Image (cartoon, helix red, strand yellow):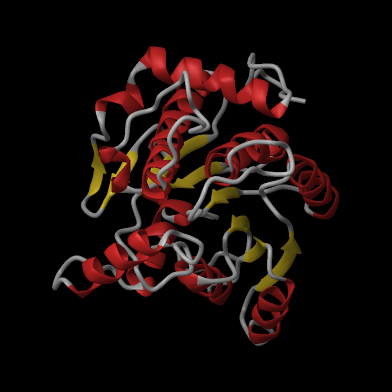
């Protein structure tokens, strides 16, 4: 285990609540500078105040990741305020109870869970390349196994189901991870992996989900051996962010026992390349990235 993280700067989205918050505090306790991104300014202020006596620091950046202009502003702030980012951790997540759209007119679950990591990685990839052990880590979920990506109706305009929308977004997370790793191969020292943190019912993830979904989550959380604690999930996430093992491993889906195979659709080259191109179009960038210099 790498105990001293005083030389690491970690950008962590979704770090003001749930296991993301636990991970942020744990990393700062080990000396890291943790730039936490969240929507709730009061939660962010409380977090930074509680971290004042830690070996490292927690700095809060308020941002609504549903908005592409906000993501671009966040990236500009990060590049201005930090000489480099060692780890870009995409941990923010949303499960919406009904279909609604982002400020950019995109189905909200897709916008926050998939397009935000896609766009933020595009904006910050060169900044990561300045680090000695640069990593991109995406929080996925085993729930992706129940999903199928309908690329002809990526935004679920025909028939919306909140759990299906969430599962599809997690499948997209893994496809993005595998495709980014493939595109980085031979070009960069940046590693990219995704992690299943476990089923963590004690988070705010499903706060906006339908009553049916919230009931299912509640029932599943009562089944012995099914739920994962916030502390255990935080440890799993932290391992990918800073431990040496994952500094030389890339393009992997990490489960409870280490690397495992995701659903075949997540690694299907045709699916992931089409999703990549569609994602680029939805955020208004070229799909021909990364290059040796992204921006």
Q: How many marks?
A: 0
Measured along the vertical axis of the image, is residue 264 above or below residue 72? above
In-image side of 68 versus 115 (left or right): right
Residue 15 quadrant = bottom right
Give the percent coordinates (x, y) of residue 67. 73, 45
Q: In which quarter of the view is residue 250 placed?
A: top left
Q: Looking at the image, which residue is at 55% across and 51% down?
A: 89
Q: Residue furthest left?
A: 224
Residue 187 seen anywhere in this rendered image of the structure: no
Point out residue 161 in the picture as x, y percentages from the top left corner.
40, 44
Q: Nearer the viewer, residue 127 or 232?
A: 232
Furthest toward the front, the residue is 158
Q: Is residue 128 above or below residue 82?
A: above
Q: Nearer the viewer, residue 97 or 138?
A: 97
Which residue is more in the foreground, 245 or 50? 50
Horizontal side of residue 205 vs 46, given as left or right: left
Residue 241 x %, y %: 48, 53
- What residue lies at 64% left-to-right and 86% top-to-bottom? 50
Which image quarter: residue 260? top left
- Say above or below: 230 vs 125: below
Q: Position of residue 93 (x, y in %)?
A: 51, 54
Residue 229 is left or right of residue 125, and the answer is left
Quarter of the image with the N terminus in it: bottom left
Q: Is residue 39 visible to the viewer in this orientation of the structure? A: yes
Quarter containing the C terminus: top right
User: What residue do we see at 54% from left, 71% from top?
Assistant: 17
């Amino acid at each position: 285990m790498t105990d001293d993280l005083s030389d690491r700067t970690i950008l962590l989205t979704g770090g003001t609540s749930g296991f993301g918050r636990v991970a942020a505090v744990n990393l700062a306790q080990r000396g890291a500078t943790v730039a936490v991104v969240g929507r709730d300014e009061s939660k962010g202020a409380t977090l930074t105040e509680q971290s004042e006596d830690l070996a490292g620091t927690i700095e809060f950046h308020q941002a609504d990741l549903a908005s592409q202009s906000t993501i671009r502003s966040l990236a500009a702030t990060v590049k201005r305020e930090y000489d480099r980012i060692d780890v870009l951790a995409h941990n923010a997540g949303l499960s919406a109870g009904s279909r609604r759209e982002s400020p950019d007119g995109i189905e909200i679950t897709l916008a926050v869970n998939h397009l935000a990591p896609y766009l933020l990685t595009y904006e910050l990839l060169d900044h990561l390349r300045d680090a000695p052990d640069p990593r991109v880590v995406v929080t996925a979920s085993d729930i992706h196994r129940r999903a199928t990506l309908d690329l002809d109706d990526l935004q679920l305009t025909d028939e919306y189901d909140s759990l299906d929308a969430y599962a599809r977004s997690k499948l997209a997370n893994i496809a993005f991870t595998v495709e980014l790793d493939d595109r980085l191969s031979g070009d960069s020292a940046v590693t990219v992996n995704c992690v299943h943190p476990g089923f963590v019912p004690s988070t705010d993830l499903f706060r906006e989900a339908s009553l049916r979904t919230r009931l299912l989550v509640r029932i599943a959380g009562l089944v012995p051996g099914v739920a994962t604690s916030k502390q255990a999930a935080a440890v799993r996430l932290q391992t990918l962010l800073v431990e040496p093992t994952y500094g030389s491993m890339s393009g992997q889906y990490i489960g409870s026992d280490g690397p495992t195979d995701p659903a075949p659709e997540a690694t299907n080259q045709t699916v992931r390349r089409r999703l990549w191109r569609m994602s680029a179009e939805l955020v208004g960038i070229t799909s021909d990235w990364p290059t040796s210099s992204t921006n």
